[in-house]
Amino acid sequence: MGTVVSMAVVTDELSLVFAALADPTRRAILERLAEGEATVHELAEPFAMTQQAVSKHLKVLEQARLISRTRSAQSRPCALEGGRLADAAGWIERHRKVWSDRHDRLAAHIERLKGVAR
C-alpha cells in the first residue's frame, strides 16, 4: 500500500515567493532577468528544456509576482519585479537577527555552564 503525501496549499504571498525560489531553474531565470527583459525564447536558450517547460516556470514566478509580462508587438517580454525579492530578503534578515541573538545567548549559557562544571 502506497503512502499518500499531501502538500500544503500555498496561500500567503511570502510562501509563494519561497516556493518559487526553491527551484534552481527559476532562480537562474531570475538571475537572467536581473540583466534585463527577455522573451520566453531567450530565457529557454541556456536550458535543455522546451519553451513550454520554461513557460511553466514563468507562470510560477508570475504567480509569486517575482516577474511581470508585458505585450510588445508579438512577443511577451518578462521583467524582474524586485520588490517581492526585497520582501523575502527583509523577512530573512529579521529572522536571521532573532536566530543569531538566540545562538549568541545559547553560546554564552554553555560557556557559563562550562565555568561552573570546572
Image (cartoon, rainbow, N blue to C red):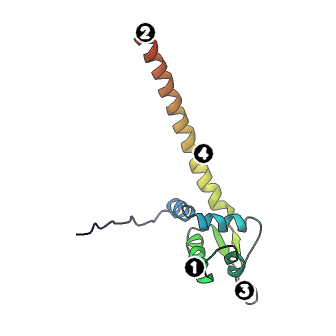
Graded by Cα atoms within 10 Å as few (under 14), some (14 to 19) or many (20 or more), the crowding at tag 4 reads few
Are there few (<14), some (14-19), or many (20+) residues within 10 Å of tag 1?
A: few
- Cα–Cα gap, marks 1 and 2: 62 Å
Nearest to N terminus: mark 2 or mark 3? 3
Is residue 54 placed above or below 93 in the rendered structure?
below
Q: Secondary structure at mark 4?
A: helix
Q: CA distance from mark 4 to mark 3?
A: 37 Å
Q: Which residue is mark 2?
A: 118
Real-space Cα separation, disc 2 to disc 3, in angstroms: 72 Å
Which residue, given by chain and number where applicable, does mark 3 sit on?
75
Circle nearer the N terminus (1, 2): 1
Q: Amino acid at mark 3?
A: Ser
Q: Which residue is mark 1?
A: 53
Q: Nearer the viewer, mark 2 or mark 3?
A: 2
> Which amino acid lies under the numbered mark 2 shown in the image of this protein?
Arg
What amino acid is labelled 4 in the image? Glu
Image: 98 above or below 36: above
Q: Which residue is mark 4?
A: 93
Q: Residues within 10 Å of mark 2 (few under 14, many from 20)?
A: few
- Disc 1 secondary structure class: helix
Question: Residue at 55% across / 62% down in the picture?
Answer: 17
In primary-sequence order, the first of circles 4 and 1 is: 1
